Image (cartoon, helix red, strand yellow):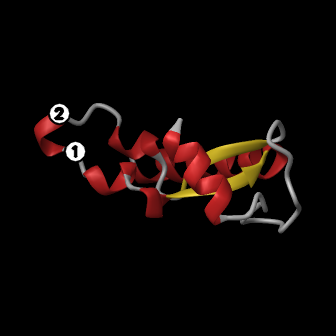
Amino acid sequence: SEARKHIWKRDKGKCNECGEQCTRRTWDLDHVKPLMEQKGIKANKLDWSYYELNNMQTLCRPCHKKKTKRDMKNNKNNA
């Protein structure tokens, strides 16, 4: 997608957590503010900033897994 290309280029392919250089096959596009926070919200009430480029970052797969676990735990605590 265009967003993935833009984020890869902007972040120079480096993981924003650990700083490792990723390859085009070993990185994930991550939403800094996790999209799961928008789950179940009606379209007219969505916070569209979650979908903006400045809420996206490059993460290597291991860091993305860790962040997702953290986000899920935080989301449960805030529910």
The CA distance from mark 1 to mark 2 is 6 Å
Expressed as whole percent of the image width and height from the top left, the position of residue 72 reads 57, 44
Residue 17 position within the rendered picture, expressed as x and y whole percent measured from the top left: 75, 65
Task: Specify the quadrant of the image occupied by residue 29.
Answer: top right
Q: Identify the residue shown where x is 88% and y is 59%.
A: 21
Task: Residue 76 in the image: state x and y as whole percent.
Answer: 49, 44
Residue 73 visible within the image:
no
* Mark 1 touches mark 2? (CB < 8 Å): yes
Residue count near mark 2 (Cα–Cα under 10 Å), binned few <14, some 14–19, many ≥20 = few
Horizontal relation, residue 35 to residue 5: left or right = left
Which three-letter amino acid code belongs to the residue tagged 1?
Answer: Leu
Q: Is residue 2 above or below residue 42?
A: below
Q: 53 and 55: which one is in front?
A: 53
**Where does the image place residue 49, in percent across and percent down from the top left?**
32, 57
Residue 10 seen anywhere in this rendered image of the structure = yes
Residue occupying image coordinates x 35% and y 35%: 39
Residue that carries the numbered disc 1 in the rendered image:
46
Name the residue carrying label 2. 42
Quarter of the figure with residue 24? top right
Q: Which amino acid does label 2 sit on?
A: Lys
The residue closer to the viewer here, 9 or 42, is: 9
Report helix, strand or loop for mark 1: loop
Residue under the image location 23 percent in, 36 percent down: 41
Residue lying at 44% horizontally and 40% vertically, measured from the top left: 36
Left of 61 or right of it: where is 34?
Answer: left
